[in-house]
Structure formats: structure tokens, C-alpha cells
Amino acid sequence: MKTIQFREAIAEAMSEEMRRDDTIFLIGEEVAEYNGAYKASKGMLDEFGAKRVIDSPIAELGFAGIAIGSTMTGNRPIVEYMTFNFSLVGIDQIINNAAKIRQMSGGQFHCPIVFRGPTGSAGQLGATHSQAFENWFANTPGLKVIVPSTPYDAKGLLKAAIRDDDPVIFMESEQMYGDKGEVPEGEYVLPIGVGEIKREGTDVTIVSFGKIIKEAYKAAEILEKENISVEIIDLRTIKPMDHAIILNSVKKTNRLVILEEAWPFGSVSSEITFMVQENAFDYLDAPIKRITTADTPAPYSPVLLKEWMPNANDVVKAVKSVLYR
């Protein structure tokens, strides 16, 4: 095993797949000459050249459409958005073309494409640069949605996403690119749609994903000092979702808290709550609690931002609530 940064895991996954398959190319703003806005494509222009690592203009609708069209001629593009906030400019191409090509062509065309980049808040970036759209894309039939939280998961799942014959939304975080973690030296690919229990526990289940899961780990350490045993599930993939891992855990702990960095209405946590009450209602010893951002645009003020974003103390309170403590 080796220890590398999250950004290096992303670069390794793309580079290894591009060496394996010359139909793969990377396109996006600053991915080439600048080595990526967050240095997640560092060195790739030097290795693969300007025909396979392509700097685009600031025109998300345009380069998304070019990449989607290229899948019909046998290519497997990776599209990097500087932030998924900017994907809204190109969302028509993602929703109405990439997600629907297979069905609308009667299976004559596939769309093997990955749209990747950071999601959610990255601090004081204001309301238009701090949004999480996992639930938006997961609401679209034809799209797979992946949100890893570690370098190991990021590399293995990105390789799987690149090899997938359907469009995949791969969401990262500006605040995780410098995170370090162990990654195998050799080849590995992780299956899409499989969650992982990151921490075993017996008293309550916490389900989360992406960078906000770090707050669950902090809360678990605090709660352990009070003899409260927390089980933490990292979904890793939002769609298709690993329902079984959640249900099995709830049947063991009988309590569920969901932690998500997104607005509450129509959220991923809403979907999980419905799924659990439909399939494991009789196992619940307390109402399900969910923790989300406040139902407002993200504030710029650091004082307000701290209140807006879920934190470990919120998780501790929710866990104690479902335990009636």
C-alpha cells in the first residue's frame, strides 16, 4: 500500500485507464496546461498530449455536448467541471442527451461518459458556488451517481465509472483533494452500487457520504466516550443505492441517523428514510433523524456558514435523540 492524496488518486485512475484504452480522453477548463484547477490532472498533458487532455473554453454546455457526441463515434470521454455548480450551464446535455441516448436510440447507442468535479460547499465561496446536486442527478433515470470520501474509494470507483457503458456523475470535493489515504500499488476496481461499513457499531446506524461523513467520525469518537456504539455506513454510490447494507444495519441497531450536505427537501436522506420505513419499519425503535444543511442558500459570512453546515455536534444531538438520551 502507498499513501497518496485524493487528487493523486483521481489522476492515477484517469491515467491508468487512458493507458489501457486510447478511446478515453479528458476535457474541461484548465485540465491541461494548468494541470487541473485542483491539480487532479497533473502531468497528464505531458504524457497523453493535447488531443487527449483538452483545455476547453468556459462553455460547459458546449464541451459537454461535444463529449457526449463523441461517445457515438466510439470514444469514452471524461468531462471535468471546475465545480458542479457550473454543470447547471450544461445540464440540458447531461439530462436530455447523455442520460437518454440508450433508450431513445433503442439501444443502438451507449453513452460511456464520466462527468466529474467537486460538489458542495468549500468554505466562503458564496451561494452560487456551494451547492450539492447529488439528488438532482440521482433523480434522472439513466445516470449513475458516485460520491466517494477517501482516496482508496475515489480511485477504485473512478476506474469503474470510466469502464461503465452508461453515463456516470462522479462528485468530489475541493476540501478533500488534499486528504491522504492508503491506496494499493497494483490494479483494483471497486464495484458501483456497493456501500461500506466504515465503523462497526451496535446502538445506532449513521448513513452518510462524501466529505460530510468526516463529521460522523468525529461524533462517533465523542459518543464512544459515553459508551454509545455507532455504526457508520459510507454509501459511496448514491444511485444505484446499496439498500441492503442500510437495512441490515438498521435491523441490528434499530435506530437510524442520516447525515447529508444538501438541502432537506427532496434530498437523498428523504429517499433513504422512505426506503427504510417501507422495508424495516418494525425494526425501528425510534423515528429516523436526518441532518442536512439549512434550507437556505449558502451564506458567505463564516459565522452563518458554520450554522448552515452540519457538524459533529449536530450528529451527537441526533444520535442521543434517537436513543432518548
Image (spheres, rainbow, N blue to C red):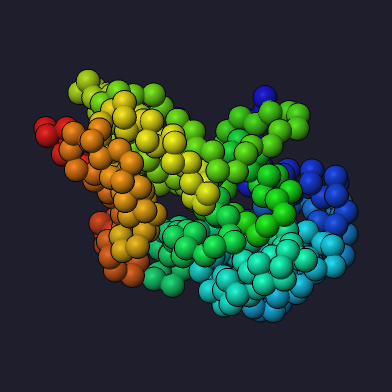
Q: Do we see residue 301 in this rendering?
A: no
Q: Residue at x 38, y 30 (%)?
A: 248
In this picture, residue 220 sits left or right of residue 211:
left
Q: In this view, does 321 lie to the left or right of 2?
A: left
- Kindly give the residue lying farthest to the left in the view shown: 325
User: Which residue is more in the foreground, 6 or 131?
Assistant: 131
Q: Which residue is drawn at 58% across and 55% down?
A: 144
Taking the image as shown, residue 76 lies to the left or right of residue 222, namely: right
Residue 266 position, x and y percent, is 35, 62
- Counting from the top left corner in percent of width and height, residue 275 is at 35, 47
Could you tell me residue 64's position as x and y percent? Answer: 68, 72
At a point 73% along the width and 28% down the height, the residue shown is 185
Residue 275 or residue 267, whichever sits in front? 275
Above or below, 210 relative to 227: below
Q: In which quarter of the image is residue 301?
A: bottom left
Relative depth, front residue between 240 and 4? 240
